[in-house]
Image (cartoon, rainbow, N blue to C red):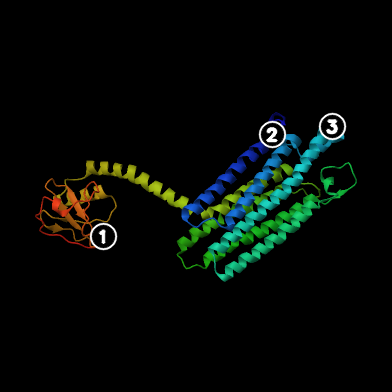
C-alpha cells in the first residue's frame, strides 16, 4: 500500500479521509467540553453523537484501506476493465475495494442514524413540553424504520452475500443505483422533518422577533447538511445504470456527514459564544479605551475641577456605575446616582459604595481602607444611594 500509486481522485480522497475525521473529533470534543462547562452534564444525545463519530472514524479507516490497497482512486468500472484484460493484481484489488465498500456502507448508514437520534434526544431535552416530546418520539420511530430496513437491504444486497466482492460464483445483486436514490431521498425527507421541529417550536415561543431569528438561525444551519445530502444523491445517481459514481458519492457523503455532526453540535456551543464576547470586550477595553483616552487627552479642553474629578473616577474604575459628588466644594452631579466620595490629604479618591456596604471603601488600588485612615475629615456633603 503506497500513496504514490494514487491518481488525482485518490489523492483527493486521501486528503478527505484525513481531514474530515479531525474536524468531526474536534467538534465532538468541543461539544463535551461545552456541556461540562455550562453545567448541563453529559446526556444521552451526547453519547449518541459520540457513537456516530465512532462509526464514522471506523468507516474512514476501512475506506482508507480500500483506497490504498484497492481502488487507488479509480471507479469500479475502471478496475473491471483491468480484470477483463487478465490483470491478476486488478482482480485482487477489485475484491479488496468491493469488500471495503460493503463494510463502509453499513458504517455510514449507522453514522447517519445515530446523528438523527442525537438530534431528536437533544430536542426532547430542550423542548420538554408533551407536544414536542411526542413529536421527537415520532421522528425517532421514523428514523428507526428507515435505518433497520436499510441495513437489512444492505446486508442482503447480493445473494449470496459474498457475491458482492467475489464474482467467481453464481449470484445476483440488486440495482444499487436505484436503491441509493430511494434511500437518499427518504433520508433527506427525514432530515427536513427533524430540522423543521425546532423552527416550529421557536416560532411559538414568547420572545422578541430578534431573539427568535437568532435562535432559529442556529438550527437552520443544519440546512447545510440537507443540501449536501441532496448533492450526494444528485451527483452519484446514474440514470439507467446499476452502479453509482462511487468517487462523487463518497465525496459528498463525507461532506454531508461532517456538516451533520458539526451542525448537531452548534446549539451546545453557547459557552464558546460567551468566551468570544468576553475576549472581544477585553481586547476592546485594553486597546480601544487606551487609544480613545489618548485622543481625548490631546483634544479635550481644560476641565473644571468637578469634571476632572468625574473623569478621574471614570478612568480608574471603567464602566462601573459610580457617580460622585465633589466634597471639596460640596457640589454634586444630580444627573448621576451618587455614592460617598472621600478624598485624603494627597487628593487620592476613596470611594464608598452605597447602602449595604457600610464598612468597605475602595481606593485607587481597589484595596479596602478604614474611615480612620482618611486624613481629610472635612466632609461637608455626601449622599448614599444604591449603585446601579
Q: Residue at x 59, y 67 (%)?
A: 133
Q: Which residue is mark 3?
A: 88
Number of other residues with Cα within 10 Å of mark 2, as a class: few under 14, some 14 to 19, many 20 or more: few
Nearest to the eye among marks 2 and 1: give it: 1
Q: Earlier in the sequence, mark 1 or mark 3?
A: 3
Q: Earlier in the sequence, mark 2 or mark 3?
A: 2
Residue nearest the observer in this picture, 55 or 183: 55
* For the residues bearing labels 2 and 3, Cβ distance under 8 angstroms: no
Q: Which residue is mark 2?
A: 8
Q: Is residue 248 left or right of residue 323?
A: right
Q: CA distance from mark 2 to mark 1?
A: 68 Å
Badge 2 marks a residue whose secondary structure is helix
Badge 3 marks a residue whose secondary structure is helix
Q: Which mark is residue 211?
A: none
Residue 248: x and y, percent? 70, 43
Badge 1 marks a residue whose secondary structure is loop
Number of other residues with Cα within 10 Å of mark 1, as a class: few under 14, some 14 to 19, many 20 or more: some
Number of other residues with Cα within 10 Å of mark 3, as a class: few under 14, some 14 to 19, many 20 or more: few
Q: CA distance from mark 1 to mark 3?
A: 85 Å
Nearest to the eye among marks 2 and 3: give it: 3
Q: Which residue is mark 1?
A: 387
* Quarter of the N terminus within the rendering: top right
Q: Residue at x 78, y 50 (%)?
A: 177
Instruction: Identify whether 222 is placed above or below 243.
Output: below
Q: Residue at x 70, y 35 (%)?
A: 10
Q: Residue furthest right?
A: 170
Q: Residue furthest top?
A: 4
Residue 43: x and y, percent? 56, 57
Amino acid at each position: 500500500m503506497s500513496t504514490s500509486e494514487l491518481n488525482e481522485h485518490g489523492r483527493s480522497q486521501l486528503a478527505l479521509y484525513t481531514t474530515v475525521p479531525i474536524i468531526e473529533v474536534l467538534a465532538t470534543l468541543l461539544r463535551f467540553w461545552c456541556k461540562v462547562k455550562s453545567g448541563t452534564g453529559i446526556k444521552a444525545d451526547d453519547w449518541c453523537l459520540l457513537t456516530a463519530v465512532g462509526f464514522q472514524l471506523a468507516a474512514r479507516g476501512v475506506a482508507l484501506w480500500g483506497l490504498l490497497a484497492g481502488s487507488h482512486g479509480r471507479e469500479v468500472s475502471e478496475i473491471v476493465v483491468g480484470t477483463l484484460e487478465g490483470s491478476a493484481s486488478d482482480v485482487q484489488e477489485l475484491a479488496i475495494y468491493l469488500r471495503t465498500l460493503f463494510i463502509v456502507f453499513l458504517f455510514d448508514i449507522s453514522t447517519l442514524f445515530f446523528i438523527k437520534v442525537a438530534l431528536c434526544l437533544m430536542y426532547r431535552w430542550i423542548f420538554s413540553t408533551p407536544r414536542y416530546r411526542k413529536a421527537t418520539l415520532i421522528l425517532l420511530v421514523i428514523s428507526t424504520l428507515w435505518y433497520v430496513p436499510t441495513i437489512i437491504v444492505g446486508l442482503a444486497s447480493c445473494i449470496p452475500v459474498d457475491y458482492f466482492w467475489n464474482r467467481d460464483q453464481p449470484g445476483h445483486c440488486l440495482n444499487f443505483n436505484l436503491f441509493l436514490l430511494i434511500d437518499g431521498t427518504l433520508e433527506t425527507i427525514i432530515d427536513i422533518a427533524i430540522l423543521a421541529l425546532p423552527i416550529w417550536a421557536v416560532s411559538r415561543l414568547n420572545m422578541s422577533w430578534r431573539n427568535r431569528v437568532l435562535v432559529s438561525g442556529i438550527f437552520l444551519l443544519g440546512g447545510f447538511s440537507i443540501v449536501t445530502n441532496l448533492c450526494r444523491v444528485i451527483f452519484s445517481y446514474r440514470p439507467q445504470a446499476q452502479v453509482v459514481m462511487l468517487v462523487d458519492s463518497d465525496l459528498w457523503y463525507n461532506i454531508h456527514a461532517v456538516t451533520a455532526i458539526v451542525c448537531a453540535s452548534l446549539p451546545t456551543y453557547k459557552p464558546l459564544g460567551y468566551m468570544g464576547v468576553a475576549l472581544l470586550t477585553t481586547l476592546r477595553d485594553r486597546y480601544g479605551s487606551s487609544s480613545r483616552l489618548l485622543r481625548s487627552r490631546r483634544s479635550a479642553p481644560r476641565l473644571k475641577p468637578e469634571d476632572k474629578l468625574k473623569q478621574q473616577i471614570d478612568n480608574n474604575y471603567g464602566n462601573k456605575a459610580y457617580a460622585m459628588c465633589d466634597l471639596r466644594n460640596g457640589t454634586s452631579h444630580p444627573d448621576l446616582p451618587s455614592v460617598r466620595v472621600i478624598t485624603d490629604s494627597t487628593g487620592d479618591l476613596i470611594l464608598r459604595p452605597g447602602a449595604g456596604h457600610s464598612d468597605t471603601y475602595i481606593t485607587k488600588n481597589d484595596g479596602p481602607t478604614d474611615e480612620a485612615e482618611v486624613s481629610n475629615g472635612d466632609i461637608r456633603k455626601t449622599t448614599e444611594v444604591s449603585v446601579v
